[in-house]
Structures are given as structure tokens and as C-alpha cells.
Image: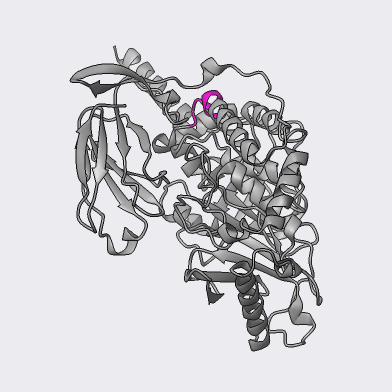
Amino acid sequence: MKKIYSFLLLCMLALTLQATTYSGTLPIMYIQTENNAPIVSKDDYLNATYYVDALGISGYENIGSAAAPLTMEIKGRGNYTWTGFNKKPYRIKLTEKQSLLGMKKSKHFALLAHADDALNKKGFMRNQVGFELSRLIGISWTPETKPVEVVLNGDYIGLYFLTETIRVDKDRVNIVEQADEETDSVAITGGWLVEIDNYDTDPHVTIKEGDEHTMWFTYKTPEVLSKSQEDFLMKEMLRIDGLVYGDKNSDQLWQYLDMDALARFYIVQEIMDNYESFHGSCYLYREIGDGQKWKFGPVWDFGSSFNRSKSLYLYEGDVWHNHWIPEICQFPVFMECVKKIWNEFYPTKFNNIFTFTSEQLTLLKSAAVADANRWSEYNGNADLTKRINNVNTWLRSSTAWLNEQWGSGGSAANPEYNPDSVEQTIMYVWQNGKQIEYNVAQVDSITFAKKDKGIVVKAKVPANWKETIYVWIWGDGITTYEHVAMKQGDWYVFAYEGEELNIIFKQREGWTGHPNQSEDIYTTRSACYILTQDGEEKAQVTEVDCP
């Protein structure tokens, strides 16, 4: 009996170890901090060592070894991704330049966790697809990113994406690196690398946008400004802002902004429906010299993509205020440029994205399972085939809508795919006092996770609600956030796996003062609701037959 018991314990231990170990299908990066110290700061680097075991996989090479690791520094990075998830992203600085995973030599990389991609079942594809579209459309430089499994201080911490950080460098943003605290009148004209930021904690200059929104321009290069540099940057941004909100038939704006670069950047954001794209993590750069133009790019952070059906532009019903682009899209000459590039790109190059996602599926499939085993709370990508099929379906839908707006008759070839692989979820709603079948996957082009139980709610918010409608969902005692932009006056459908659903609807202007924060819907069964509201009072909810 003791032998059987011991055998069972060994089996259980083996299963536990198997559930929290790497897949062996990708290179492994081993990182050891000094004195095994935990990484708890985004500001202060820790000393560490590292090595990369390529496991003999073709196309990769070992860097260092367990016996002879190399030195580096590591700290946390990100904003919401740093505070909102247990699986953390990191920034690393190598002591000596290395060509990690075949990328160009550098000291500076990020280890992106994409825990939000796993939680939201996006197949680890948001940054991957956004970056690849940037390359396909011809943006001058796009960060390289390579998947790797990571062991930190002896603990397997899952699937990560080793990514080139955005910085001035001959192999990255290839412009003159402007000196800190420069005062020379020519030198201060460039090179500049700045970010339209959504946090006011980083060093920045601030302007009031033409529509009274505050804009923060965080400067990356140079890092410390003289008064002359600060004045130059402020003057440039104010001038552009004035022209953006000025005469839409004037060509003066394009003396300061590179139209072609902006059009390519914008098209990528629209395909991804990245409704945070002109709100934060939005980069611009400028080379030295009079007459040089500001160029949008490189792309970065597609974490607000693939979240809604494509039936409006990214700045319409936006979850976050998108600076400048709603006004810029009113310039006829800019939209002519967008349509020209679209009609060159969509019929001939867009289809390559499906080859890319197929390659990513093969590359990541086993590691996604290992990551899901390690992070049970972020296990949404364990079935990567289904997730990437859903991403492909979403991309087809998004570009079909955009082609209706911008196309001139050309269309992308539609590669073979199996529609049965897309999740089809049959749920039930009340109509005339009876339950009827309801195919969630076919409603408003929104697809939900397959489930055997749960609740589907269809809600119509007031047509006079402005800008974003935030949806907060509480269920089974767990708080989950669905920051979803809703088209006002239309029905919106969503589902939840639990047995009870508590929803708050809130307008954008209520974010600070919370005037609309209230329990608008509480239900234990599927149903349809119409919301009405007077002023800032709690919304009134009426259950109706589902249309």
C-alpha cells in the first residue's frame, strides 16, 4: 500500500512539475538577479546575469551558458501591464551588445509578457500582427520581436516576447542623436524622438490641444532639455496643433508633418482598430535641420486592439481621446493619400498577414500551453488554433469594412480557412416569456468564448450619451474590466461565463467624478435591456423582448 501511495505522490509531483515548465519548442532565456532579489521597481535596475539556451533549435544560437553567464541589468516596465498583472513585463540592459535570438546587436530590449493578450484571448497576436502590418505597409522601421520562454531566478515564468525598444540608433530610429541640454540653434532642430503620452509622470512638455484636451509630449531623445530645446519643442507642437485645427484645405500643415508616414501609420492603427493609438505610446521623430518634417512612428503597443466589431473609425466612440487624428482626417488631401496607399497595399500585400499568423501558430502553439499552465489566471490562449482563427476572422472583417470606405474596387484574396473553427456559442435569451436559442457569434460580429453555461445580455444605451460608454463587469466575486467603446443608440451584446452578472455603464465624462457609476444591470439570466437616463442620475433599466 505504501508503495502505491508513494507512486501516486511521485506521479502527482511529476504532473505538477510538468504543468509549470517550459515547452522546449522555443529558446529559453535564464535570468538570475543578484542575491535572488525580486524585481519590484520600474525605476531602479537590479544587477543580474543571463544566458540563452537555444536548445539546438534551427535559426538560433546560444548566448552565454549556465557555467559562464553574461551580465545585465533588469527592471520592471509598462504602466497598466506592470500594475494590473502578476505576469510582469521587464526592461533589460545588457552590459555588452548582443545579437539575441538573431536580432541586430544592442544592449537594450524589453521582455513583453502580453498577459492582457492571454486574459482577453487574443492569441498573443495584437503586437505581433500590428508590427507585421507595419512592415508590410512600408513604415521605415518597426521593432523586431521574438518569442522566448523565460526562467527567472529558477522559476519558469512563461512565454515572453523579446522586443527591440524604441530608441535613436542606426539600427532603430536612424536620426542624429541630439545632445542633452543643447543650446546651438541648428543642433536643437533634431534629432528628436518624442511620445504623445497618456501619463504626466515622465519628463514632457504640455500643450492645450485645439479642442481643449491636454497633450503631453514625453521626450525620449534628448532626455534632459535646455531652455532652448524646451522652447523649440513647445513651439513646434503648438504650431502643428494650430494647423491641425485650422483650414482643412490649406497645405501648410504638411510643411511640418510628413503626410505619407502619417498615412501609413494611421492605416495600420485602423486595421487593428487600436483606439488608444493617438492617445498614448504614439511616437514621432524629427531629423536635424531646417525644413525637416515630423514623422509618426514607429508603431508600439497594440493592447487596445481587436476589442470591437469594425463599424466605425478608431476615433469614433473612442474609449480614449485620440489627439489630432479626428481633425487630420478632415483634410481632403490627407484622405486622398490614405486611399492611395490603401489601394496599393490592400489588394497586393495585406494577404501576407495570414501567412504570418499561420507561422506564428506553428511557432507558439506548445509554448502557449506551457504559459497557460504556468499562469492559470491568464490561460485564455491555451487553444491557440482557435484564438488565431478568431484573429484572422476579425482581420478579414476589419479590412472589409475599411475597403468599403477607402477601396476603389480592388480586394484582397481570401485564403482558405475553416469557418467551423471559429467559436460558435449557442446561448439563450428570454423573448415573450420563453427561452430561445441565440447564436452569440453571429451578433454584431462579436465572438465569445465557448461555454456550456453563462449569461448573454443585450443592452441599448441612450443615443444622447457622448463619446465612450465604459462597461464594468462584476461576476462570481471577481472584478473584470471590459473597457469597450459602444456605438451609442445601437444594441450591444456581451456574454459572461458565470451565474450572475453585475454591470456598470458609464460615460467618459463620468470617469473622474463618477456621476454615472451605478449598478445599472444585475441579472442571473439572459435578457435584453434598454437604458435611459436623465442628467447624471442613475440610469433606468427596462427589460424588453429581444429584437
For residue 147, what is the image quadrant? top right
> Could you say which is closer to the camera, residue 542 or residue 367?
542
Work out which quarter of the rendered image holds the C terminus and state it.
top left
Does residue 355 lie above or below 477 as drawn?
above
The residue shown at (49%, 50%) is: 316
Residue in front for this viewpoint, 460 or 521: 460
Residue at image position (23%, 23%) is 430
Q: Is residue 145 visible?
A: yes
Residue beneath the point at 72% across and 51% down = 336
Query: Residue 471, position in %: x, y?
Result: 34, 45
185 drawn magenta: no
Q: Position of residue 390 (x, y in %)?
A: 53, 28
Relative to 436, 79 lies left or right: right
Q: Tell me how the rendering is colored.
A: one colour
Residue 62 in sight from this viewpoint:
no
Q: Write the residue at 24% across / 22% down.
A: 431
The quarter of the picture where the N terminus appears is top left
Q: In this rendering, is residue 463 above or below 404? A: below
Q: Nearer the viewer, residue 46 or 195?
A: 195
Instruction: Give the vertical position of 114 relative to 206 (above or below).
Output: above
> Which is more toward the observer, 46 or 300?
300
Q: How many marks do you count on the picture?
A: 0
The x and y percentages for residue 13 are: 40, 26
Q: Which residues are magenta?
A: 381-387
Horizontally, residue 510 falls left or right of residue 117, namely: left
Residue 262 x, y percent position in the rendering: 69, 57
